[in-house]
Image: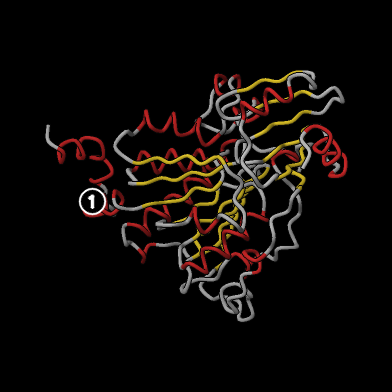
Amino acid sequence: MNGLDKIYERYSRQMLFSGIGSEGQDKLSKSAVLIVGVGALGTAIANHLVRAGIGHVRMVDRDYVEMSNLQRQMLFDEHDVEMHIPKAEAAKQKLQSINSTIQIEAIVADVNPTNVMEFMDGIDVVLDGTDNFQTRFLLNDACYKMGVPFAYGGVVGANGLTSLFIPGETACLSCLIQSDTSSGDTCDTIGVISPIVDIVASMQCVEVLKWITDEHEKLRRALVSIDVWNNRQHQISIAKPKTNCPTCQQKSFVHLERSTDEATTMCGRETVQINRGVQMDLEEWSNRLKPIAKDVKKTPFLIRVSLHEGERFVIFPDGRVLVQGTEEINRAKSLFSRYIGN
């Protein structure tokens, strides 16, 4: 079986669809996407796009797999929880067994103003799999500065929001939502059901497929709001940007200019993230902490440290330390200084 036959065998049903065909499939194979956040939305998005034959899928996530993720994050299993595998790495392992013909890149990192442009290098579309508006507004700024479409999506409870924001053609996220008006509700505070995740991720992906295959006249060009529990849905047009929008009209990308906070609270997680700013050798830090901590467990991706005080550290090679068991930044910094120092 030659190369063309193998392509047709894998993607035949998709290529038979008139909106894609063989030309569209070729465009998909030559495209590259960035998925930021590999949790509920991110795993569903990655599953769709890898199976669709996107040529290069780059995934970035800062977290590792926990038991509470398995209810809605489709690429993970109990083994990933047991081994404390970072979400990006666990997703890559599953996706490579689904489609070995494409390039899948997993990056374990916190997306922030210092690295977001690097992650977007060579990317055609950015997809939102995040769980916080701070990162979403950062991605919105980066996409509109770089002229790259941003497939926004958010879910909480039984509610979802999604839209494809296109620089130079549509309004942007900042036109519709002010950065200081988020309700603060998250999956960790009010819960979420998995069907809304699948619905929103599917809607994000279908708009991306339309964009990449040049079916632009089929794009929705609206912000869609869905409540699957109460059977409600409505759309808000994004055809006209706000005339005074700081991002897409005034080109003031304030979220790209903000400094990276040394310590940030992860909402609803009883966790404070501290960014040390330098690489941390896991072997070295495992040996340092074993004599003074209650328990130290090292994996190829991270170290989990149980402290005598009751809190826990999760240490990543890129210099990030999660202090679990507290939401008080001063308490987290005190423990960090006591065990790790500057």
Asked if residue 202 shows in the view, the reply is yes
Which residue is at a point 77% across and 45% down the rendered structure image?
265
- The quadrant where residue 338 appears: top right
* Residue identifier under label 1: 21
Q: Position of residue 158 (x, y in %)?
A: 65, 43
Q: Position of residue 110 (x, y in %)?
A: 61, 46
Residue 294 in the image: above or below residue 125: above
Question: Which residue extends farthest left?
Answer: 1
Residue 183 in the image: above or below residue 143: above
Which residue is at a point 57% across and 29% down the rendered structure image?
301
Q: Position of residue 71 (x, y in %)?
A: 61, 29
Q: Quadrant of the C terminus?
A: top right
In this view of the protein, which residue sits in the foreground, 315 or 146?
A: 315
Q: Position of residue 247 (x, y in %)?
A: 60, 72
Q: Quadrant of the N terminus?
A: top left
Asked if residue 231 shows in the view, the reply is no
Mark 1: secondary structure:
helix
Q: In screen coordinates, is 291 left or right of 30?
A: right
Which residue is at a point 80% across and 32% down the rendered structure image?
339
Type of amino acid under label 1: Gly
In this view of the protein, which residue sits in the foreground, 206 or 225?
A: 206
Q: In screen coordinates, is 99 left or right of 108?
A: left
Mark 1: few/some/many CA within 10 Å (<14, 14-19, 20+): some
Q: In screen coordinates, is 251 left or right of 325?
A: left
Which residue is at a point 37% across and 62% down the rendered structure image?
218
